Amino acid sequence: MSTTVIETKGLFKRFDQVTALNNINLKIKKGEFVAIMGASGSGKTTLLNILTCLDTSTEGSVLLNGVDTAELDEEGRRVFRANQIGLVFQQFHLIPFLSALENIMLAQHYHSITDRNSALKVLEQVGLGHRVDHLPNQLSGGEQQRVCIARALVNECPLIFADEPTGNLDEENEQIVLALLQELHAQGRTIVMVTHNPELGRYTDRIIRLQHGKYIGEETHNEADI
Amino acid sequence: MAENKLTGSAINMLSLIIIRSLKVRFQQVLVVFAALMVGAAIITAMAGVYFDINTKMSQELRTFGANFYIGPGQGTSLSNQTYDNIVSKIPDSTLVATSPYLYGVARTELQKVILLGVDFSHLNKLVPYWQVKGKWINVGFDERHAMIGATLASQLELKVGDTITLTNNAVKHKLIIRGIVESGEAIDNYLIVNISLAQSWLKKPNEVNYALFSLENNDEQVSHLAQSLYRQYPKLEVRPIRKVSASEGKVLEKIKGLMGLVTVVILILSTLCVNTTLTAMIAERRREFALQKALGASHRDITLQIILETTIICTVAIFFGLILGYVLAQILGHAVFDTAIDLRIQVLPITIILSLVAAFIAAIVPTRRAIHIEPAKVLKGE
């Protein structure tokens, strides 16, 4: 039986009078590829921010690889994020004056030490071995997102979180990125992807649905009503 | 990027980020650099003048004339020997000029005149404010030439090069007028001759009415000398001429205060300019810092990055500021004191420390903003 690597218990997030997350209880197993879906304002990004230690919950616990991150202070969450979490953003967020390779090495820098060879290796893994020295503005949107994925992979973090990873891509690049995520999934990585695009759910093991901050159910890939 | 400059598997990512970041924001960096450089230059110039001003002001105020008087006290007289003894006690580095003064009435072929005996060799340094038509007499033992006050010269219709003859019964002594003096004082009525000639002609061979001194006063030498002479010659009248020596101190204090004020104002303006530009730069880089924090950068990493960037700009600014400040100090020195300003060693640490302090104060608020960026909000575009 697979180990649970992500678990939330009684998770609440309130902003003044607004409850963005309302008693979320989730379990995600090691190696799972899970989509968190819901309409805008459903709380999926808020949940992702808490799961990635970029934000804190108002109430409840968040167990990531057995560590209750809700108990960690800011420094503890930073260290945990650097060591355990790979992030893929919708808007790529690459440093504009660093090359593709250097952007990947930046993640190494904040994790431990830079290693050009392993950075090159992940860049080749995402099919950008020929774009090593290119600046972000010299890359297409799809290529930038692949650099972003490579950056999430370079430290071999066990948990990968992707926030609308294909949201800014055309269909062709969307397929490339999804294929890449599936490949990582096949390699045994745990991937949590936030999306509002029902089409993307087809590529995951499980879809967790949120509505108005509440968990409203989950479906496996075959059962998902997408 | 055309060429990747990575040379090994391990690179210093921090220096890479800093150098690229400075290059990519060159215009803003230039503004920060300019503000800090101007600040450093003003500090250098002002500190340079500040430390050199005592000497320069003292030299400048010498142009107002003597600042020390010695005369006979009650029931005493001032002799040549006493005067010479006093002069010998004054260090060469302090004594700018001195002259004994002896007055008396003498007869000339034209009319009676007041004869003033002085030491010509020091006169142009002792009373540099005299307006002399013709030439000064620079030789102390010259008994062939004389200077004459402008009023007396006018009365006697004498001009430079004319001869005036002192007469004493059958004894005559011809003097060629070398210069006509216009001082705005009683001197304008006198015939000015060599002290030894005056003493012999007036039959006062060892007598001096009083003596004037022009002394360096950049280190309160006038007061010290006065105290020393009071003790040694209690019967003589020894007094600093306060009009000059005291005004030195007051003027110096005011000028130093003004320079301090200008420096502080420029530093504040420089700090505000750097602060504004750094704040704008940090605002522009919010996503960059948010991403770095999301990737695991600590507050220390972000602070270090900003501080190092600021330090690099500041270091270059200090270097050029010191050069510019030196030039400014020279311009100031020549404009105000008509002389070069010597930059003392103290100027260097003062410029470096004050510039760094200004830069770091300016960087406090932008740095705090950077480290308090919330990656979740910024990366989502909020």
Image (cartoon, coloured by chain):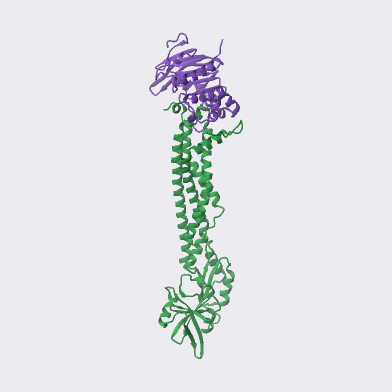
Chain colours: A purple, B green
User: How many discs mark residues in the rendered view?
Assistant: 0
Q: Which quadrant of the view contains residue A199?
A: top left
Q: Is residue B170 above or below residue B306?
A: below
Q: Residue furthest left?
A: A17
- Residue depicted at 50% across the width and 36% down the height: B21
- State the image coordinates of residue B19 (x, y, percent, origin top left): 53, 37
Residue A107 image position (x, y, % from top left): 54, 27
Of A153 and B347, nearer the camera is A153
Looking at the image, which residue sits at the far bottom? Answer: B170
Point out the residue furthest to the top here. Answer: A223
Could you tell me residue B226's position as x and y percent? 53, 67
Residue B115 seen in render: yes
Residue B249: in sight, yes or no? no
Q: Nearer the viewer, residue A26 or A161?
A: A161
Question: Residue at horizontal 46%, vertical 49%?
Answer: B264
| Vertical placement of residue A102 versus B212, above or below | above
As rendered, which of A194 and A26 lies closer to the eye? Answer: A194
Viewport quadrant of the C terminus of chain B: top left
Where residue B45 appears, x then y in whole percent? Answer: 50, 53
